[in-house]
Image (cartoon, helix red, strand yellow):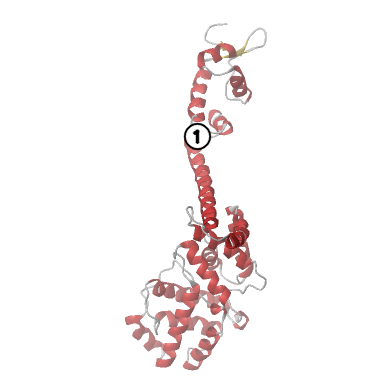
Amino acid sequence: MTHRTWSIGELAAATGLSVKTLRYYSDSGLLPVAERSGGGHRRYGPEAWERIGLIRRLRALDTPIAAITRVACGEQTLGDLVATELAAIEEQLTQLRWREATLGALDDCADGERLRRLEILARVHRLPEARRSLTDHWYRELPAEMPRRRLEIMIAMLSPEPSHNPSPAAALAYAEIHVLVSTPGFTRWTGDHAEEMRDAPAFYGEIDEAAALTAAAVQERLRPGPGPAVDAFVSAHARARRESDTPAFRRFLHALVSRSSGFDPRLRRYWGLLDAVTAGRSLNMTAAHAWLTEGLSLSIAGTVPCAENSAHGSAQGPPPARKAHSGPAA
């Protein structure tokens, strides 16, 4: 036996770590045993010194022993460990920021309002579960015939990723959204006339164009009026019902969308709450619905044929489609 190996006591004396700590590292598989003494005691070689150095550096960063073990045993690279730990810390920070926002929402209000808010905010104390429940709700509610791509766009709009650094108002609004969707009879966003569509695939194909054009117009604060967005909206509904785009059909469609769920007060509140949650980054579907309804009304008042509408609308209509959003459908 040479002095290139050390007993656990010698290793403890040289490193300043306790025998108990070194034994724990050894039992965890962190410290490789070079050989056994005649009495069966573990002896440690130079590799143990290197391991102790790695352990000390990572423990100084509060890295869990289990994670250090994976790196030491070659199951995970140091780079992967750093990335994993950063992601875990970001998740913890997000939870702390939401806790701070929640407490902030409970701080600046009277006692009665504080109790009301407390009951609401308690619904979203675990963010991943809260978002999953919201997402699951809309997967159940949105039409089964909706194309997958458009379904995913709508889910992203209706159930946005919570902010990593919310304001108290955003935290409260996010909790109120969960209360709203759990209300019995909460109206589906799609309206009450989907059963009248004979060609739903055609509708969902063309409504994407209308939605993108409307989103661009609303975001750029363009005035409603005849133009490509309205024409695409009418065309989608006409094809879905196997009708023609005529003044009579436009009057029918205007009456339909004017009384549709786009103006349901619960949905108005839902989109208003989403505005607060996303700080206005999400398209307000009530605003888009209102924009299209007024534009459709003006197109009827002008009684402009569809081909002329497109040319006339180019001056005041929305710019080319931006496919970042999907939009309303009556």
Which amino acid type corresponds to the residue marked 1 in the rendered image?
A: Thr
Q: Quick check: can you spot residue 253? A: yes
- Residue 68 to residue 315: above or below: above
Image point (50%, 34%), residue name: 77
Check disc 1 and report its element: helix, strand or loop: loop
Q: Residue at x 39, y 83 (%)?
A: 227
Q: Measured along the vertical axis of the image, is residue 235 above or below residue 304?
A: above
Query: Residue placed at 53% from the left, 60% from the top?
Result: 109
Placement of the N terminus among the 4 image quadrants: top right
**Viewer can see residue 202:** no
Q: At which x and y percent is residue 248? A: 50, 93
Q: Nearer the viewer, residue 88 or 148?
A: 88
The residue that label 1 is drawn on is 77
Residue projecting furthest to the left: 315
Left or right: where 227 falls relative to 66: left
Q: Is residue 92 above or below residue 318?
A: above
The x and y percentages for residue 95 are 54, 49
Q: Quadrant of residue 42?
A: top right
* Residue closest to the eye, 115 or 111: 111
Relative image position of residue 150 (x, y in whole percent): 53, 68
- Number of callouts in the render? 1
Q: Is residue 129 above or below residue 19?
A: below
Q: Position of residue 213 (x, y in %)?
A: 42, 75
| Quadrant of the frame with the C terminus | bottom right
Check disc 1: other Cα within 10 Å, few if <14, some if 14-19, many if 20+. few
